[in-house]
Image (spheres, rainbow, N blue to C red):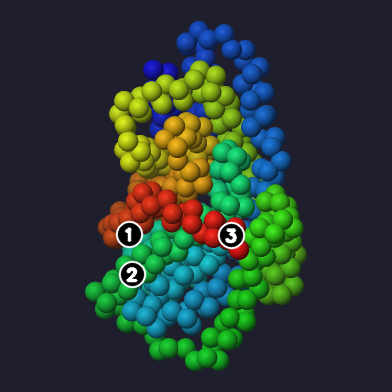
Amino acid sequence: MLALTLFGIFFAIALAGVPLLFAMLVTTVGVIWASGMTHPMETIFLSFIGGVEPFILLAVPLFIFAGELLAQGGVGKRIVEFARVLFGWLPGGLGVVTVVSCTLFGGVSGSAIADTAAIGSLVIPAMVARGYSRGFAAALLAVAGTIALLMPLSIPFLIYAFISGVSMRTLSMAGLLPALATALALIVVCMWHGRRSGCDNGDERSTPAQIWAATRAAGPALLMPIIIIGGIWTGVFTPSESAAVAVVYGIVVSLFYYRDLHWSRLPQLLLKAFMTSATVMLVIGATGAMAWLITVEQVAVQLAAWIQVVATEPWMFLLLFNLCLLLLGIFIEPLPAMLLSAPLFLPLAKHFDMDMVHIGVVMTANLAIALYTPPVGGTLFVAAKLAKVGIGEITKHLWPLMTATFSIVLLVTYIPQLSTWFPRFIQSL
């Protein structure tokens, strides 16, 4: 089967340490050449260029730059203080504050890496000083940082909307309940850990004056997702235009309101965002070339035939869907993993008459878990660096957290209403 050949070669090259971009291109060209196919090589080039041409992808570098602005512009520390005065009195209070802070900042940045880095630099020293082990602090941060991928401004949601044709307007609301459910599950684990270890029995309750001061300070940051999503839902601006609005809002808040960011820092942040965006766009182009070959050679049709033999019921397909995404995400970052897998799985999901919004949320939730699954993972490495602890030490503390998040993924997978009810409710208003 061509599908097995294609992915077998790809994973062999990628696991050998070849950068993802070249692994995809070498696999695509190599399979065409070795199989004696008659496709002209010019088609690979045209598919590569065509993959990065859609206007909606302009939002990716803009959202990345907005995330950099907010991560460096004082938004993170205001959000952490806001979470502390509201939830710091609970058992495991600092852990709870970490989860709530990551959830709120994720609604602003849409990036798991930016979320982990911005919040981790603020909460990890405090957690270690309180008596939390560095391993648990890093594990919690690595897991909580990925909640950003399910929040309304999620960059993976933007990519999925482009691939599937689903409305970003609808998708932006679909991940909200799963994100809050994930946060609640992690909060329960933090409270359990705080009581069990005795390291954090919570602080005193904050006074109304402290709550008001923290709310006023964090207000401009917390308003950003409301303004962006409200603008999309009311039709004031498109998802692509919302990214530009996010950049302008980030500049205003960081430079003129909080004043924690100076004009001289902007070129450095622009360069960093450009480098990240260039990497993403190159991978998108390479994925477009591979997706073209997959489409032309009817790989999806072959997989559909195989799935019909192995998974005769929708629940069986969803189980295989989750397992494949988890395995794929261990080796590949969420954006390229989604670009690679969506063209394969979406036709199969349509065969079982599944909601494409629901499938998008399930796909994103699985790829989020892969970000902190050992031995590799973006948030895992960021958290390890911030906490100055090894991956092995973090792994010992990951299991209760992963159990909580994977339980939510299973609920979202088999109860579609968790991702489809809220958008429909908003539309009915």
Residue holding disc 2: 188
Q: Residues within 10 Å of mark 3 (few under 14, many from 20)?
A: few
- Tell me the quadrant of the picture where the C terminus can be found: bottom right
Q: Secondary structure at mark 1?
A: helix
Looking at numbered disc 1 in the image, what kind of residue is underneath it? Ala
Looking at numbered disc 3 in the image, what kind of residue is underneath it? Ser
Q: Which disc, if any, is residue 342?
A: none
Could you tell me how far apart the alpha carbons at marks 3 and 1 are, in whole angstroms?
32 Å
Residue mark closest to the camera, 2 vs 3: 3
Residue sticking out furthest to the left: 196
Earlier-in-chain disc, 3 versus 1:
1
Q: Mark 1 and mark 3 in contact (Cβ < 8 Å)?
A: no
Residue sticking out furthest to the front: 428
Which residue is found at the position 39% from the left and 83% from the top? 89
Q: Is residue 394 visible?
A: no
Earlier-in-chain disc, 1 versus 2:
2
Q: Nearer the viewer, residue 302 or 102?
A: 302
Task: Indicate the quadrant where residue 152 lies.
Answer: bottom right
Q: Position of residue 399 (x, y in %)?
A: 28, 57
In this picture, is 70 found above or below 239? below
Residue holding disc 3: 428
Q: Is residue 350 left or right of residue 130?
A: right
Q: Is residue 198 visible?
A: yes
Which residue is found at the position 49% from the left and 65% from the top? 103
Earlier-in-chain disc, 2 versus 3:
2
